[in-house]
Image: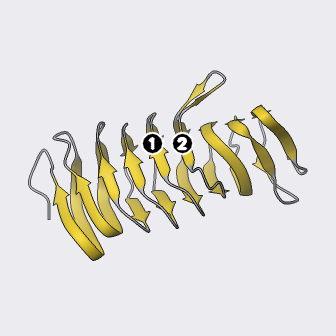
Amino acid sequence: VSQSRYPRTASTGNVSLNAVSGDIVDGTTPSLIGKGAELVAGGTGNVTLSNMKVGVVAVNAAGDVNLTNDQASGLTVGVVGSTSGIAAKSLNLEEKTGDVSVNNNVNVAQDASIKADAGDVFLGADVTSASGNILIDAYKGITQTAGKILANVLTLTAQNGINVAQSDNNANKLTAKSTVAGDVSYKDVVRVS
């Protein structure tokens, strides 16, 4: 069952899509345009939107979430309507042109990927996986100002430095690489391999 297979637009406001027991998927491009997007998929519902143009996103889904956004001013994981942050089985979140700011918690059961193809990733809230791996990839840099990261394997990749040094981070294994310039700083509650 598909909740959305055609564009939803609210150029100055928010778009809310709620699939009580089905998926939210896109059919034409751009699939969703607005100030913010509230996406709720119940049952075993998945969310797949491959060409969004929104500034803020909030998702509550029982299944997998795959979102690609293309907003020059960037994408914030925040509050839209009554939904806060992102809760899902797994997450692939990609911003094509701007920064990604995680201002509200991201909680997944399995793997999560957060990518800023042309900008920075700013972490101001929790990014946690109950049993999976987390990848955070930024064209520019990765900066954590609050919150914690919990993961089995944590992979951090950026060109211009990584500062993920909140004291509550906890990963069993860490791979961190700054490919062009800048230092790598990481803090964990226990020793990490």
Q: Residue furthest top?
A: 82
Residue 6 x, y percent position in the rendering: 91, 50
Residue 110 vs 158, above or below: the answer is above
Colouring of the image: secondary structure
Q: Observer-nearest residue: 41 or 142?
A: 142
Q: Residue at x 48, y 61 (%)?
A: 119
Please tell me whether mark 1 sits on a helix, a strand or a loop: strand
Q: Residue at x 49, y 61 (%)?
A: 115
Asked if marks 1 and 2 touch (Cβ < 8 Å), the reply is: yes
Q: Dot 1: within a 10 Å radius of its alpha carbon, few (fewer than 14), some, or many (20 or more) residues? A: many
Q: Which residue is mark 2?
A: 76
Residue 67 x, y percent position in the rendering: 64, 54
Q: CA distance from mark 1 to mark 2?
A: 6 Å
| Residue type of the residue flagged with mark 2 | Thr
Horizontally, residue 50 falls left or right of residue 192, namely right
Q: Which residue is mark 1?
A: 102
Residue 97 vs 127, above or below: the answer is below
Residue 84 location, quadrant: top right
Residue 2 x, y percent position in the rendering: 85, 47
Residue 107 in view (yes/no): yes
Residue 170 vs 92, above or below: the answer is above
Q: Observer-nearest residue: 19 or 21?
A: 19
Q: Dot 2: within a 10 Å radius of its alpha carbon, few (fewer than 14), some, or many (20 or more) residues? A: many
Horizontally, residue 193 falls left or right of residue 93, namely left
Q: Residue furthest bottom?
A: 180
Residue 155 location, quadrant: bottom left
Horizontally, residue 35 falls left or right of residue 56, namely right
